[in-house]
Image (tube, rainbow, N blue to C red):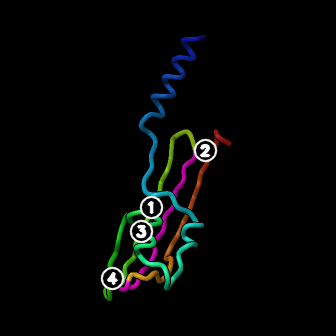
Amino acid sequence: MKRLLGALAVALVLLTSGCYEQRGKRFGPEEIGQLEPGVSTERDAIDKFGAPSAVFTYAGGSKLLNWQYVHGIPIGTTSEARAAILFDADGKMMRVVSFSHQSVERWWNQ
């Protein structure tokens, strides 16, 4: 019995080691809601969410900044958040173009 439990413990460690994933800085609806169009700046958003995962610059100088947060482990909850925020040429926030937030709990954790 002790051998079986030991083998199961080793198997669990091997299955889960190195499988943890996190990209970006965690954010959700609350943090997005703290930004105000016409008031908040690119710097405010970067301070809040970290460096954007992508930046698109348009004619006229406006920019679309994208952020992505991913956190997951194979035997637990997975969380994802994505945001795209448009800023004018002066660096002031114009609007949130898109935002999605998802948290999935694995069936065996329910």
- Which residue occupies 32% across, 85% down? 61
Q: Please, what secondary structure does the residue beneath circle 3 have?
A: helix
Tell me, for residue 40, which label it has, or none: none
Magenta span main SS: strand
Residue 108, compared with residue 72, is above or below; it is above
Q: Please, what secondary structure does the residue beneath circle 2 have?
A: loop
Give the image location of residue 75, x and y in percent: 55, 39
Residue beneath label 1, please?
68
Taking the magenta stretch, the answer to whether it contains residue 82 is yes
Residue beneath label 2, please?
106
Name the kind of residue labelled 1 in the image.
Answer: Gln
Q: Please, what secondary structure does the residue beneath circle 4 have?
A: loop
- Which residue occupies 42% across, 81% down? 87
Name the kind of residue labelled 4 in the image.
Answer: Tyr
The mark that comes first in sequence, 3 or 2, is 3
Give the image location of residue 83, x and y in percent: 48, 68
The residue lying toward the viewer, choosing from 34 and 7, is 34
Numbered disc in front, either 4 or 2: 4
Numbered disc in front, either 3 or 2: 3
Residue beneath label 3, please?
46
Question: What's drawn in magenta, residue-wise?
Answer: 77-90
Q: CA distance from mark 3 to mark 1?
A: 12 Å
The mark that comes first in sequence, 4 or 3, is 3
The residue lying toward the viewer, choosing from 108 and 58, is 58
The mark that comes first in sequence, 4 or 2, is 4
Residue beneath label 4, please?
58
Name the kind of residue labelled 2 in the image.
Answer: Arg
Give the image location of residue 13, x and y in percent: 48, 28
